[in-house]
Amino acid sequence: MITIRKQLLIGLMSGVIIAILAVGIGSYLKVRHELNEIFDYQLKQIVRSFPENMSFQPSETSDRHPGKKIVVQVWDRHNYLAFTSNPAKDLPRYSDTGFFEISFNNQRWRVYSEENFQQRVQVAQLIADREKIEFSLAMRSLIPFLILIPVLMLLIWFVVGRSLQPLKHLANSLEERSADALHHVNTEGYPPEILPIVEAMNALFSRVENSIQLQRMFVADAAHELRTPLAALKLQLQLVEKSEDNEERARGMHKLHERLNRATHLVQQLLTLARHSSGSEQENRVTVSLSELAKQSVSDFSLLAENKNIDLGVDIIHPGLTVSGYPDALRVMLNNLVDNAIRYTRNNGRIDVIVCEEDHAPCLIVADTGIGVPPEDRERIFDRFFRCTGTEQSGSGLGLAIVKNIVDQHHASIRVFDAEHGCGLRFCITFPIPARPDGCFTANGKII
């Protein structure tokens, strides 16, 4: 995998080289164009500098510089060659005027011809000589660009390395940490581009630390809560072993089974609490029908309610209500509320699972005619292992804690009220208003 450093170096250096080459080529072409214009201007000035009535003065310059190899010819009004600068290269007189190119003795010439004081003045220059001078000067103009390339390469190498130092510093600071060091990374000294990474890591450290604290609390609570029933089981087993009477042994075995059932229920509740307290979402969210959820829960607990002659029913005020969530978790949540209501509702009581709306938000209500909860204890009933004083039913104190965790997992809220008529409680769970794909919110199939 290509590192960020390599990507930056390759990208920047390639961009610099391409830019310099483009500028260099443009400069090279511009220099050649300007030199062509200068040479043409020079030819024109030579033509216009000759005086009137030239006498025949053949001569040849001894300067071999390409720029000096210019053939100048002057014809008088009688078409007589009055002057030539190079008798060895006498070009014929051409009828054209102005600039034009010719081929003479297998060589290409640039010619300028003009009538001057009733004389025809013709100046010619080898195109090969012009191109040689143009190439030489154009190449000299590229020398600064050729020097600039390695200088910019070194500068880019240095700047990229310097700019990535904060990342290296962050990596070194993380490598030096121990496995249990979850304190925040100091954000001072980091550039604004690195700060979001550092802040995201600090947020991750906080979440990991909270998760570890929850696990430690769970282990401590589980160890504390399991110690008493296990000790009681061991003591009950010893009593059964010492018992010599069959009837007394049978009563002991019955109590032993009861204690085992309680311990099993406690372990199951602990596992359920651990699964829903971890915050992990193993399954995908789906659309869950609250009516179907309520009907299924009531069906699951109908026999248990019949044993206490409790009227357990469903009241669907607003059918068709759905929420986005995790079906198994919602089923555990509602089952715990119904199970809790059955435990603390006396015989011949009543429990209703209500599906309704509250300010267009889907709601689940579990109302019972049970013994209720004192107002001073309602803030603590969702704490782990908390049980109200004076209750006769056995339990682990984890059911409502599991309910609260699942409610939070679905970004819902749960409130506790007194029953509308007589004694008992109403647990009201309000879910967020579901959103449509187009951004609108719906309730009971209507756009709001």
Image: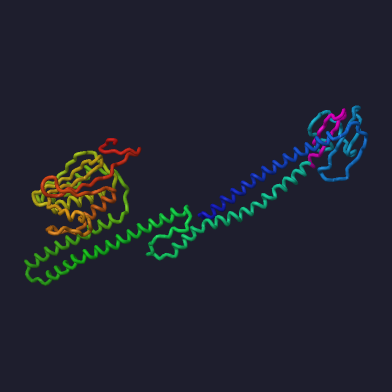
Quarter of the image holding residue 157?
Answer: bottom right
Identify the image quadrant of the C terminus: top left
Foreground residue among 107 and 127: 127
Identify the residue shown where x is 81% and y is 39%: 126
Identify the residue shown where x is 92% and y is 37%: 57
Quarter of the image holding residue 443?
Answer: top left
Side of 193 where 323 appears, left or right: left
> Which span of residues is magenta-colored?
110-129
Where's residue 174, x and y in %? 44, 62
Where's residue 397, x and y in %? 19, 58
Magenta region, main secondary structure = strand
- Compared to residue 340, the image places residue 231 above or below, namely below
Where's residue 94, x and y in %? 84, 30
Where's residue 210, x and y in %? 33, 59
- Compared to residue 259, the image places residue 317 above or below, namely above
Q: Is residue 248 visible?
A: yes
Side of 344 where 172 appears, left or right: right
Residue 404 is covered by the magenta coloring: no
Identify the residue shown where x is 42% and y is 64%: 177
Quarter of the image holding residue 277?
Answer: bottom left
Identify the residue shown where x is 10% and y is 48%: 349
Residue 116 is covered by the magenta coloring: yes
- Compared to residue 185, the image places residue 350 above or below, namely above
Farthest right residue in view: 56
Report the coloring of the rendering: rainbow
Side of 448 where 232 appears, left or right: left
